[in-house]
Image (tube, coloured by chain):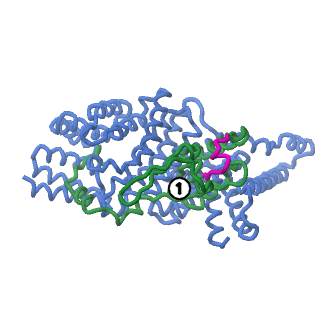
Amino acid sequence: MKATDIHRTIEAVWRIESARLIAGIARLVRDIGVAEDLAQDALVTALEQWPESGVPEKPGAWLMSVAKRRAIDRLRRGQMLERKHEQLGAELEAQHQASAPDLDAALDDDIGDDLLRLVFTACHPVLPAEARVALTLRMVGGLSTEEIARAFLVPTTTVAQRIVRAKKALADAAVPFEVPRGEDRDARLSSVLEVVYLVFNEGYSATAGDDWMRPGLIEDALRLGRILAGLAPREPEVHGLVALMEIQASRSAARVGPAGEPVLLLEQNRARWDQLLIRRGLAALERAHALGGEHGPYVLQAAIAACHARARSADETDWERIAALYATLAEVVPSPVVELNRAVAVAMANGPAAGLGLVDVLVASRALEGYHLLPSVRGDLLYKLGRLAEARAEFERAASMTHNARERELLQGRAQACDVTH
Amino acid sequence: MRVMVLVKATKDSEAALMPEQKMLEDMMKFNEELVKAGVMLAGDGLQPSSKGARIQFSKGKTKVVDGPFAETKELVAGYWIWQVKSREEAIEWARRCPQPMPGDCEIEVRPLYEMDDFGEAVTPEIREQEARLRRQSAELNK
């Protein structure tokens, strides 16, 4: 095997094994930052040795045994230091030995629990969202710092700093390596789901840059979601999020035009929707419902996405059901963005005037100032009502507010169309 | 990227011989691992080619040929669809697969075409279709 080939193989092994490795070691050292450093050391050792020795038959076990050895060395060093400092007597020392963790037994336990602990710790609310995203992609998704930086269009050093700071913040806050229970659990779980959906959305509707979508991030998010569903199969919201992402991702190929411009939902060629992902999404939604999660925010959003997925053509869309789902969603998580979406659905079900009424309430509340989709939606409804001059002004305003180049072009095009259509 | 992973047929699979319990268990465990890693999208086993048929196209005509088919090693006995980050990752997963059949056998990894691969192949009709006025809204902006 050529040197470049073996490096790519090691990268692939790392992607497969790193999360389990970090999670397993974190159980010993109770600190995911330290665990990650030790796992990285094992990777460096592999990079040194495998080009000579070849990739071992069980590379995961190989990496684990190297990392474990380092972990034990580290624990011993820590114990010795402790002994020196506290000048422990022989008696205490014997006690220490007796209470030393049974390392092998600890590592042989179900790795799934450790992975779940890892996910919860990396997504701890003590960290800012961008740090949670970076840590999760790196520790659970197996992405390198460079890959994360490329995906989010920021310098590598920025991501590296984010990760270092996040590790330190977790250690400083003495965040325990555990799966939260009781009341805490729901809030902590939403923090995890938020991270995964943030990654997805950055891929699905990029907030920055020239591309409308970044498929790599969509895949990473889907993978994280699917992993999570395997780790927490009794949580309806996890399946809801997976369903939402699978169904939205099913439209990826259809929502980009030949010149890279966005193609909006009702204009999409539904033959290009990915039926495999739709089936997976609908199945995940069914699981969420079977677990009694109809009213979870992600499950509701997935149910809305499913309405579109089930409609064979745009005309067959069940807008009344979508409007009703948005109304429920607005009760569960009151938000002006949800309200805006409800306005669109109501407009589709009952006519643009009904939708415009809801939009104007939002405009008056000033809750969505600076959000480009508000004037964009308003422009659309005005356009449908034949109030072209007002529509044009709204589209122009929306175009000046978006940061995505592709979206801006589309909005400018719509503004111009208000002149030529009579 | 997505890959299709093909498990090639053997004399046993063509004879519809069921694998041993141990092999089934190992395979189930492997499948579970693939699901938990978020890699597996789909997968199925195929019945022997004796249950299948081939539709041959020639000079604008079709001809149906019933199985079984010779060249056993070129036949497919099962498949997976995996989502992976690279060709190498697919190969690493395939290496972790328990031997799928008794005796010598083979797994083939083939990347699927992705939407980027069709970038230049878009027809003018599609362009025209997509150049029609677009409606823009939050709900529709998906």
Locate residue B88 relative to residue A209 in the image: left or right.
Answer: right
Q: Report the front residue among A256 and A338.
A: A256
Locate residue A23 relative to residue A364 in the image: left or right.
Answer: right
Question: Residue at (54%, 39%) from the top-left corner?
Answer: A229
Disc 1: host chain = B
Residue A72 coordinates in the image, percent (x, y): 79, 52
Quick one: label 1, few (<14), some, or many (20+) residues within 10 Å? Answer: many
**Does B70 sit above or below residue B26?**
below
Q: Report the front residue among B26 and A183.
A: B26
Residue A359 coordinates in the image, percent (x, y): 21, 40
When asked about the image quadrant of residue B51, the answer is top right
- Can residue A176 be seen in this snapshot? no
Q: Count numbered badges in the picture.
A: 1
Q: Report the front residue among A93 and A160.
A: A160
Question: Residue at (12%, 43%) from the top-left corner?
Answer: A385
Locate residue A25 relative to residue A405 in the image: left or right.
Answer: right
Question: Residue at (68%, 48%) from the top-left corner?
Answer: B101
Chain B representation colour: green
Mark 1 element type: strand
Residue A74 coordinates in the image, percent (x, y): 77, 55
Residue numbers of the magenta segment: B7-17
> Quick one: which residue is furthest to the left in this view?
A422
Amino acid on which the number 1 mark rests in the picture: Val
Q: Report the front residue among B58 and A86.
A: B58
Chain A representation colour: blue
Locate residue A5 relative to residue A61 in the image: left or right.
Answer: left
- Can residue A127 be seen in this snapshot? yes
Specify whether residue A238 is painted magenta. no
Residue for badge 1: B3
Residue B90 coordinates in the image, percent (x, y): 59, 57
